[in-house]
Structure formats: structure tokens, C-alpha cells
Amino acid sequence: MVAVLAARSRTMSAMSVYKESASSVPTRCPSCRGAVIQRLPGRTRSFIWIHCFYCNRTWKRRLDDPRSSPDGELTGDVFVVTTGGARCSLGSVVLNAIPEEALKKHLERRMAGGERESRKLPREIAAVAATLEKTRAEENRLWTIQKADPDNLRKLKAWSVVYNKTKAITKQLEDLQAQRQRLISGEHFFQDLPSPISSATTSADGKFTLAIPRDGRYGIVARVSRELPGDMQKCFWFVWVSLDGVHSKRLRLNNDNMAGAGSPDSALG
């Protein structure tokens, strides 16, 4: 009976070590941040060995050290204060964590593309605006002629053709002006973002928990476009964060650190 109990005790102890080691396996390589990693066979009671297929790195990890996990938590909430002074918590907002180097390269690429477009747009806008001015003058001239002879269908048709042309050129000018505005907005930089290492969605009250590595700096990227009390808002966030080795930190995304607010933590400067 004693032998049976001892054997059972050893079995339970082995299962405990196995469960602990399985639950302690990290989800990401601390060196290259690759997510394809494998716990190697064989272990002691204190260590397990892990291999990364991305950078071919092998390292050991203590089973009894909770701080050995490369991941920590970024918690917080997302809200905006409307022009009327009301605070609105934003639910269903997706937050993405992107490594610093990847996000910097993306922003530099989008900035360079935006500058090239910005140099061309003023010339295009000026040319379309000049054409619109001439077309409006012709429309006004034909309208004056048509009013003097309202039953003349030929004159009415001539005015109608130029009127429709004026509408089309006006729309073209508005599109170019909107394009110029987008080039300096968060929407331009949000296109073609690099793949995030982790994502989270805010709850109905705007709260979130996002897993990110303890080491390194990451860009937290989010956007929202919805009707809020009193106005319609499009909000973009590109905010640098770092856990600095600690288990968790808090972050609030709000009016103070959204794109264009001039926050020192903004990745857009």
C-alpha cells in the first residue's frame, strides 16, 4: 500500500511538472519575436529548452520563474471627449501592436509617398480650378441667353450641357482637395500597415488588454470612425509604448494622444 501511494505521488508530481512546463512555454521568441517556436524534448525539474525556427536560436527557461515569460500586458481604455465636453467610451475598437522597426519603416514609406503626391496635387488643383472658373463663366453666359428666350430648346440644351460639365469639374476639384487632406491625416498612414504581433478589441466600455513583449518598443495603432453625440469623428492613434521589462502597464487612447494632437508619444511626431 505504501509503495502504491509513493508511486502515485511520483506520478502526480511528474504530471505537475509537465503541466507547469507546458503552460510556461512562451508564445514568441524573445530575440526575433517569431511565433514559430518549439519546446525541445527532455527537461530537468527546473528548466525546459526551447527552439525558434525563425532565427534558429535555442535557449533554456526556468519553470519556477514567472518573470521568464517574454510577454506582458498592456491594459487601458479608449475614449474621446466630444466638442460638447461629453466623454464617450469607444467599444469594438481594434488595437494592433506593431514592432518599432517595422512601423517606422512603414511610416517613412508612407511619408515619402505623401510628399511626392503633395508636390503634384497643388498644380493639379490649380489647373482644375482654372478650368472650373472658365466653365462657370460660360454657364452663366448661356443661362443669361436662355432666360431671355426660355422656350428655345436649343439654347436650353446648350446651357444644360455646360451646367453638367460644371458639376463634374466641381466634383473633380473636391476630390483633389479631399485627397490632399488625406495625405496629412492618419488615414493615409493607416493604409497597408505591417502585420501586428498581437491585437485586441475594446469592450463596450472601451477597455482592453493587449499582450506585448516585455522588451522593446511597439506602436499601438487604432482608428475609429463613428457618429458621436453632437458630431461625426474620425480618430487615429499611432502611439509608442514599452513595458520596460515590467509585467504590465496602462495606456489611455484619447484626444490627447490621437494623430495630430502633438503628443510626444505619437509615432507621427
Image: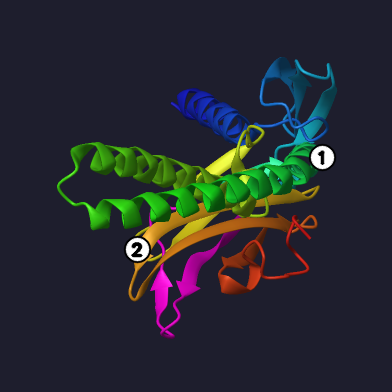
The crowding category of the residue bearing disc 1, from other C-alpha atoms within 10 Å (few below 14, some 14 to 19, many at least 20), is few
* Residue highlighted by disc 1: 101
Seen at 38% across and 58% down, the residue is 226
Seen at 34% across and 76% down, the residue is 230
Seen at 59% across and 40% down, the residue is 198
Seen at 78% across and 50% down, the residue is 217
- Residue 77, labelled with which disc? none
Residue 9 can be seen, yes or no: yes
Q: Position of residue 122 (x, y in %)?
A: 71, 49
Looking at the rendered image, the quarter that the N terminus falls into is top left
Question: Is residue 86 found inside the magenta-colored segment of the image?
Answer: yes
The crowding category of the residue bearing disc 2, from other C-alpha atoms within 10 Å (few below 14, some 14 to 19, many at least 20), is few
Looking at the rendered image, the quarter that the C terminus falls into is bottom right
Question: CA separation, marks 2 and 1?
Answer: 34 Å
Q: Are marks 2 and 1 in contact (CB under 8 Å)?
A: no
The answer to whether residue 18 is above or below residue 85 is: above
Viewer-proximal residue among 20 and 39: 39
Viewer-proximal residue among 173 and 193: 173
In the visual, does 111 lie left or right of 220?
A: right
Q: Earlier in the sequence, mark 2 or mark 1?
A: 1
Question: Is residue 14 found inside the magenta-colored segment of the image?
Answer: no
In the visual, does 265 lie left or right of 138?
A: right
The region drawn magenta spans 72-95
Dominant SS type (magenta): strand
